Amino acid sequence: MSMKYKRYFATDYKVVLAFLFLLNVVCNAAWLFVQPRLLSALLVVLLSALSAVIETLIFRCLPFRPVRMAYVGLLTVLHNAVAIVDYFLVYHFRSVINLDVLNTVLLTNDSEASQFAATYITPPTIVVFAVVCLVVNAAMIFAAHLLARRRRPSRAIFAGAVLSLVFLAVNGARLVYTQEELSDIILSVASGEAD
């Protein structure tokens, strides 16, 4: 394998890491409109770094370049969908996606859902969200390429991921669960018994 080929894929990983980090920050930043505190901003950056590192590790494990690019495309679509819903909720209801919002959606009947869609989802709204998504994603791709040229940002993202794990451990977050504990948690959330 030639050095030029290796260098290309090393840069490719750096670009993907930088892009996924920026994508996570933009998606998670909606929380700052609900909880505008310095600690919230720090958590958004650190947890975005952790998510980007995990997503990039999965990217590196995928076998072929087309599969990798499809994976990044899928992540982009999913993050954009969540960001659109989050910013919509922040703008109209001063909230982000949470268990209360999900319960409200699950308890909504067809008539209420169609009335909600007619009120809030109009063609101009769809066009505005589409244009904003295209511009923001193009800006993030451009910024990711700029960041990938530097040596320090990828190290800073990895450091942020490690710091977020340390922060979670210091605050008593359990990072290891047994299969039975995970099943109990999922079933309690699904049945509405968990907070």
Image: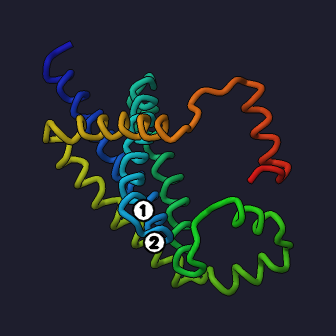
Q: Is residue 96 visible?
A: yes
Q: CA distance from mark 2 to mark 1?
A: 8 Å
Determine which of the numbered discs, if any, sits on residue 33 in the image.
Answer: 2
- Looking at the rendered image, the quarter that the N terminus falls into is top left
Q: Is residue 175 left or right of residue 153?
A: right
- Looking at the rendered image, the quarter that the C terminus falls into is bottom right
* Residue hosting label 1: 29
Taking the view exactly as shown, the residue that stands out farthest to the top is: 1
Q: Secondary structure at mark 2?
A: helix
Q: Are marks 2 and 1 in contact (CB under 8 Å)?
A: yes
Q: Is residue 16 visible?
A: no
Q: Secondary structure at mark 1?
A: loop
Q: What x and y, as percent, mark residue 5?
A: 20, 23
Q: Name the residue located 37 percent from the left edge and 43 percent from the top edge.
A: 49
Callout 2: 10 Å neighbours few (<14), some, many (20+)? some
Q: What x and y, as percent, mark residue 54?
A: 44, 34
Q: Is residue 57 above or below residue 20?
A: above
Quarter of the figure with residue 149: top left
Q: Is residue 72 left or right of residue 158?
A: right
What kind of residue is marked 2?
Phe
Q: What x and y, as percent, mark residue 147?
A: 19, 46
Q: Name the residue located 52 percent from the left edge and 67 percent from the top edge.
A: 84
Q: Is residue 146 left or right of residue 178?
A: left
Looking at the image, which is closer to me, 193 or 92? Answer: 193
Q: Name the residue located 82 percent from the left edge and 53 percent from the top edge.
A: 192
Quarter of the figure with residue 27: bottom left
Marker count (numbered): 2
What kind of residue is marked 1?
Ala
Q: What x and y, as percent, mark residue 107?
A: 84, 67
